[in-house]
Structure formats: C-alpha cells, structure tokens
Amino acid sequence: MSDLVVADLVAGYGDARVLHGVSFTVREGEVCAILGPNGAGKTTLLRALSGVVRVRGTVTLGGTTLAGRSPDTIARHGVAHVPEGRGTFMPLTVEENLRLGAYVRRGGAEVEEDLGRIYTYFPVLKTRLKQAAGSLSGGEQQMLALGRALMLRPRLLLLDEPSLGLAPLVTRELFRIVQAINAEERTTVVVVEQNAHLALGIAQQAHVLETGRIVLSGTAAEIRADEQVAQSYLGYR
Ligand code: ATP
C-alpha cells in the first residue's frame, strides 16, 4: 500500500519553526483535506512533504522515506506539488508546460499517451496548446498546473489552495476534475483549501492545523459536524 505516513514532522524557515510535530496518515487513494487559519502552516506542510523546506521527523510514502530527500528525488518517487500561485511558466506555451511536467520520466510513447489523457480531463487545454501560459485565464492556469503535475503520473498529489482567486463555478469544475482524477487514477491527494465546503466535499479525512499543530482530525463528515469548525471555516452556526 502506498500510504502517506507523516509523524512528528517539524519544519520551518531558518530558526523560525512553523510545524511543531505534525502526525497523520493518508491511506492510498484517499483525499485528505488540511484546513486552518492563515499562517497556521498549511503551505509549509505541503512544502515539507515535497522537500522544499527542510524537515525533521518521518515522511514515508509506501514505506519509502521521503523526509530529508531533495524535491527532485521526492518528485521521482511520485509526489507532485501544485503550489499556491500555480507555478506555471508564463512565457512558455501550454504544451511546453505540460511536457516539462514529464521531466523526470523517460519520455516517448508514454508521454504522448499521458498528454492525451490530460486533454480528456482538461479539454480546454487542448484548444490552447500553442498559447503562452501567461495568456490563460486564472482557471485555465490552475488546470494547466494540475495537468502538468499529472504528467508525473503521481502517486501523491499535493494541492495548495487550488481555488485561490477563481470564480465559484470554475472552482467547482476544478474540484470535480480533482475528484475524477482521484477516482480514476487512484491518486492520493492532500489538499490545502480555504474553501472548506469544497475540500470536505471531496475528502475522506480532514485535519485542522493551528499554529503548526493538528488540533482536530476526523472523517470529512465528523469535521463538518464540529461546532468550532462550522463557525470558523464553514460560515454557519
Ligand atoms: P496562508 O493560508 O496564509 O497561506 P498557511 O497556513 O499556508 O497560511 P504558511 O504559509 O505555511 O501558512 O505560513 C506559516 C508561517 O510561516 C507564517 O508565520 C509565515 O509568516 C511563515 N513563513 C511562510 N513562508 C516563509 C518564508 N519563506 N520564510 C520565513 N517565514 C515564512
């Protein structure tokens, strides 16, 4: 099983510690939502999982140790990170961006096959192949970032605030596609999201992070039913 196991994870920037011992497990093929207020350390958590910030503690995927490895090595182990702000290369075309996503792979027929698969998830990208990524709308750019991550054939997809700056309709469409990817490819997903309704709508498990610690964990239904969460993140009660 390619479960993600995180235990006693400590991470930060220089001397500033942001995560103070975070532990959770995501079962293979499940979606896990990470909720929490601004500055709680959600982005730092994803960066720690993908090797962008240095960590102490345990991170394993399917039993393979990821903690302490470089982002490149972690990507080769099947972890794709779609950062907040998307990280697409604006001057490059849509097609070039997608092909870059396969950089850790051998190429050839597999890459062509994957491009085809990505166009079925994101038909709009196929109509924009020769356009610069910078000329796309916000929603299309987020789709491109997701498509590029899929070119890695990830076992684990890390999504940081996919809804940021997008209109509600576009966001819903994006989450529908994430759910389809999760269902069809059995890709495990960890999603950090301000829109708790949407995240809990596709997640099996969720954790609430506050000042670098998990303060609440449960199934999506349990978290949705929690009085405090409802008040803080769901906007009712
Ligand atoms: P937001 O929803 O606002 O993005 P977050 O929960 O994702 O919040 P982080 O971005 O992980 O939180 O930030 C956690 C803490 O780490 C904050 O206090 C922030 O100021 C600090 N921090 C984030 N990035 C850096 C950095 N590159 N250098 C130093 N400190 C940072």
Image: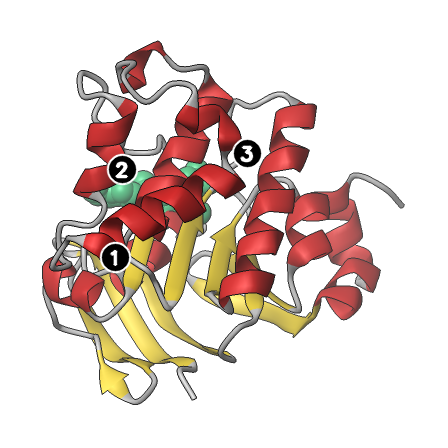
Answer left or right for 4 relative to 56.
right
Query: x and y percent of residue 124 in the render?
Result: 49, 25
Split into 4 quadrants, where in the image is the N terminus? bottom left
Q: Which quadrant contains ligand 1?
A: top left
User: CB of residue at label 1: within 8 Å of ligand 1?
Assistant: no
Query: x and y percent of residue 29 in the render?
Result: 53, 73
Q: Which residue is mark 2?
A: 98
User: Sequence order check: which comes first, mark 3 or mark 1?
Assistant: 1
User: CB of residue at label 3: within 8 Å of ligand 1?
Assistant: no
What distance separates the C-alpha of mark 3 from that of mark 1?
30 Å
**Residue type at mark 1?**
Glu
Foreground tag (2 vs 3): 2
* SS class, disc 1: helix
**Residue type at mark 3?**
Ser
Most extreme residue toward the right is 237
* SS class, disc 3: loop
Q: Is residue 101 above or below residue 152?
A: above
User: Sequence order check: which comes first, mark 2 or mark 1?
Assistant: 2
Q: Which residue is mark 3?
A: 163
Q: Residue at x 49, y 64 (%)?
A: 185
